[in-house]
Amino acid sequence: MKTFHELYLEILKQEAKEGRHLLEDYNPYHMDCLLHPEKYAPVIHTEKCEECAYEKACLNSCVFDAIRMEADGSIQIDPEKCAGCGVCVDVCKLERLAENKDVLPVLRAIREGGRDVYALVAPAFTGQFGEKATPGRLRTAFKALGFKGMVEVAVFADILTLKEALEFDRHVLTKSDFQLTSCCCPVWIAMIRGIYKDLVPHVPGAVSPMIAAGRVVKKIHPEAVTVFIGPCLAKKKEAKEPDIAGAVDYVLTFQEVRDIFEAAEISPEELTEEASEHSSRAGRIYARTGGVSEAVSKTLEQLHPGREIHVAAEQADGVQNLKALIERIKKGEADANFFEGMACPGGCVGGPKAIIEKEKGRECVNAYGDAAVYQTPLENPYVMELLARLDFGSVEEFLEKSDILTRDLS
């Protein structure tokens, strides 16, 4: 019988070329996962584990208690509890856990037509599809697949940077006040909401750049289908959270997109350039540890010169380090008033479904940031133009009325 991965690749090759499935010898559960990924958690169990020589490492690795083992050796993953951090996949030496995949529904949405499908590409994309796969060539590649267009989510990271800086300036007023940056990592937010609820008041209710991108695209193009593309499994869960569901229809990882390019025989590095970059350095560096802190600090300095912001000296990345940081904050041992958390080592560039090593990813992100014409969202005319299209008359009005960019974390 075909493994889950073998079935996935076989269907993908057919779907990319002709859309017919003439398959035999497959597990019905595997097929259902591929055809209806919305029913399952970001991580799925592909094979039974009657005997595990690794002391149930997957269960022990899950800080959200989302995994349980049944008497028959099968693993059950709770879609409500699983945040999609991917740690369990990494520790499973038997390779019986895998990421959920949205590939088939996305390809069908493109093929069916009638609605424009937009690729919302995470700031970590640079370098992932080859050194010569520039943003302009990648945009051409997505259009070759049938997408209407490609949107850089870094532009919306710019907008959320502005919101974070404004929130800090307004609410962190005494030595005991502090802000937990809220707009980037869904695992970080899931930990605070689910495990450390008493810290929620220190988290501004901002949506992530992914959700902001999806909401804005759908406001401008109400019938659009939005597909987020990044290195993160947790985004698959975030897109379905009740208070923000509907902004993003599907989530693909970089590895899933690479599989699609290969099946469709598309090489982004060999395509023509269609340049259209609108993000500043601030939005582009969100993809690596410390990027959000740097972006917010520089934007705050422009908003309010001399305003003191004390960023934590060591921004936490990795799930266990996040827990340690939160414990230090709760004990009053963290000497800062602005804290950034990233669930993946190195930040998004170290995401479980990145294609290149996190060190190389960080280099690519920094280089793309250095190449930006504008340093912060306040300098970026495209941000101001976009805010105007969303009917914000000023920066102050943006903070007061930015419902499209907020959520209730309580």
Image: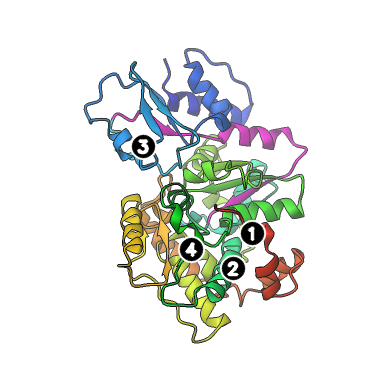
Looking at the image, do the residues carrying marks 2 and 1 touch, with CB atoms under 8 Å apart?
yes
Label 2 – label 3 distance at C-alpha: 34 Å
Is residue 32 or residue 267 the one in the foreground? Answer: 32
Give the percent coordinates (x, y) of residue 40: 52, 30
Does residue 272 appear in this view? Answer: no
For disc 4, the neighbor class at 10 Å (few under 14, some 14 to 19, many from 20) is some
Residue 163: image tag: 2
Q: Residue at x 61, y 54 (%)?
A: 407
Looking at the image, do the residues carrying marks 2 and 3 touch, with CB atoms under 8 Å apart?
no
Instruction: Say what secondary structure mark 2 lies in.
Output: helix
Instruction: Say what secondary structure mark 3 lies in.
Output: helix
Amino acid type at image mark 1: Leu
Of pointers 3 and 4, the one earlier in the residue sequence: 3
Give the percent coordinates (x, y) of residue 400: 68, 68
Label 4 – label 1 distance at C-alpha: 17 Å
Q: Which residue is mark 3?
A: 89
Instruction: Tell whether 362 sits left or right of 38.
Output: left
Instruction: Tell whether 268 sits left or right of 325.
Output: right
- Mark toward the viewer: 3 or 1: 1
Would residue 207 be counted in the magenta stretch?
no
Instruction: Tell whether 96 sits left or right of 201.
Output: left
Q: Which residue is mark 4?
A: 202
Would residue 103 be counted in the magenta stretch?
yes
Give the percent coordinates (x, y) of residue 362: 40, 61
